[in-house]
C-alpha cells in the first residue's frame, strides 16, 4: 500500500483554482521531488497534506487512511507529517535545543530530561550538537534550517515535507542542508520535497514531478525527466533553470 496518495485533489482561492486535479502516490521510503514555476501550486500541494490548507475536492490518504475528512485528528496528523519551511519558522526566544524539545514536551508529553536527551540526539543527527545552546539569531541560515529539520524529526514522522528548504540560504550554506536531506533519504525516510536543487533531485529523488498550472504535467525518474522530458513545458522550464 502506498504511504501517501493524492486522488484528484482540487483547491481554489476564491475564483482561482490552484490545484486542478492532482493524483499521484508514493511508497514508503520514496523521495518525491516537485519542481515547477512560481505560483504553480507547489506550496499549496504540501500544505494540503498537513491541513494548513483545506482541499475543496478529492482525497489525500496517509498509509491508506483518508486525512482530508472532517473527522481527521489534525494534531495527530501533524505529528505524523513533519514539515520544513523555506523561512525556518523557529522560535526566536528559544535556543536550538529549546526549539527541538518544545514538541517533545508539549505534543508527546516527554518529561523534561527525556526531551533534552532526545532533542540532543536529533541535533547530533543534523550535525548541530555543538550549537544546542545558541539562539536562532546566533545561527547561520543553514544551521537554522537544520534545527528546523531536527525539530520535525523529533516527532518521529512517517513522512517529511520540505518546501524549498534551501531557497532562502546563501549559496555556500545550501550544501550542508542538502547533505542532511540526502542522509535522511538514505536512511529510508519518505520525503516530499519542493526544491529547485537539481543535483539533489538527480541523486536522491526516486521520482520527479513537474507541476504547472496546478496540474502534474509530467512525472518520472529524475534521469528520464531531466534528459528527455516528454512534455514541452517541462523542457522549457528545465532550460530556464540552467
Ligand atoms: P508555488 O509554491 O508553486 O509558488 P503556491 O501554492 O504558493 O505556488 O501558490 C499557487 C497560487 O495560489 C498562486 O497564484 C498564489 O498567488 C495563490 N495563493 C497562494 N496562497 C494564497 C492565499 N493564502 N490566498 C490567496 N491566494 C493564494
Ligand atoms: Mg511555494
Image (spheres, helix red, strand yellow):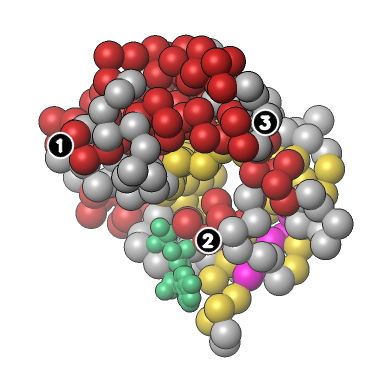
- CA distance separating discs 2 and 3: 27 Å
Q: Residue at x 27, y 34 (%)?
A: 135
Specify the farthest residue to the front: 112
Q: Secondary structure at mark 1?
A: helix
Image coords of residue 239 (percent x, y)? 25, 50
Residue 197 makes an appearance in the image: no
Q: Residue at x 70, y 40 (%)?
A: 4
Q: For mark 3, does the 10 Å Cα neighbourhood hold few (<14), some (14 to 19), or many (20 or more) residues?
A: some
Q: Earlier in the sequence, mark 1 or mark 3?
A: 3
Q: Residue at x 55, y 51 (%)?
A: 46
Question: Which is the main secondary structure of the residues drawn in magenta?
Answer: strand
Q: Is residue 89 left or right of residue 174?
A: right
Near-viewer residue (66 or 119): 119
Identify residue for label 3. Answer: 108
Identify residue for label 2. Answer: 44
Image coords of residue 146 (percent x, y)? 35, 29
Q: For mark 1, does the 10 Å Cα neighbourhood hold few (<14), some (14 to 19), or many (20 or more) residues?
A: few
Tell me the magenta residue range: 7-11
How many numbered dots are placed on residues in this image? 3
Q: Secondary structure at mark 3?
A: loop
Point out the frontmost of discs 2 and 3: 3
Tell me if residue 111 comes above or below residue 48 in the rendering: above
Image coords of residue 241 (percent x, y)? 24, 49
Q: Tags 1 and 3 in contact by the CB under 8 Å rule? A: no
Any magenta on residue 10? Answer: yes
Q: For mark 2, does the 10 Å Cα neighbourhood hold few (<14), some (14 to 19), or many (20 or more) residues?
A: many
Q: Is residue 47 left or right of residue 98?
A: right
Identify residue for label 1. Answer: 171
Amino acid at each position: 500500500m502506498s504511504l501517501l496518495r493524492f486522488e484528484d485533489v482540487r483547491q481554489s482561492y476564491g475564483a482561482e483554482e490552484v490545484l486542478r486535479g492532482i493524483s499521484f502516490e508514493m511508497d514508503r521510503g520514496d523521495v518525491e521531488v516537485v519542481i515547477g514555476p512560481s505560483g504553480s501550486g507547489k506550496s499549496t500541494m504540501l500544505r494540503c497534506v498537513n491541513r494548513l490548507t483545506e482541499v475543496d475536492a478529492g482525497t489525500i490518504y496517509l498509509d491508506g487512511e483518508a486525512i482530508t475528512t472532517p473527522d481527521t485528528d489534525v494534531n495527530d496528523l501533524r505529528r505524523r507529517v513533519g514539515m520544513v519551511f523555506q523561512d525556518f519558522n523557529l522560535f526566536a526566544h528559544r535556543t536550538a535545543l529549546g526549539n527541538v524539545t518544545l514538541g517533545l514536551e508539549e505534543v508527546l508529553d516527554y518529561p523534561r530530561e527525556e526531551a533534552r536527551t532526545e532533542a540532543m540526539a536529533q541535533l547530533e543527527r543534523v550535525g548541530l550538537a555543538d550549537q544546542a545552546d545558541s539562539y536562532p539569531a546566533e545561527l547561520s541560515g543553514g544551521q537554522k534550517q537544520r534545527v528546523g529539520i531536527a525539530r520535525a524529526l523529533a516527532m518521529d514522522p512517517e513522512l517529511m515535507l520540505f518546501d524549498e528548504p534551501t531557497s532562502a540560504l546563501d549559496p555556500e550554506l545550501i550544501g550542508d542542508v542538502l547533505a542532511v536531506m540526502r542522509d535522511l533519504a538514505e536512511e529510508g525516510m519518505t520525503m516530499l520535497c519542493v526544491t529547485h536543487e537539481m543535483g539533489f533531485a538527480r541523486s536522491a529523488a526516486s521520482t520527479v514531478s513537474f507541476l504547472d498550472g496546478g496540474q502534474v504535467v509530467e512525472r518520472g525518474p529524475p534521469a528520464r525527466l531531466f534528459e528527455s522530458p516528454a512534455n514541452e513545458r517541462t523542457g522549457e522550464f528545465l532550460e530556464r533553470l540552467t
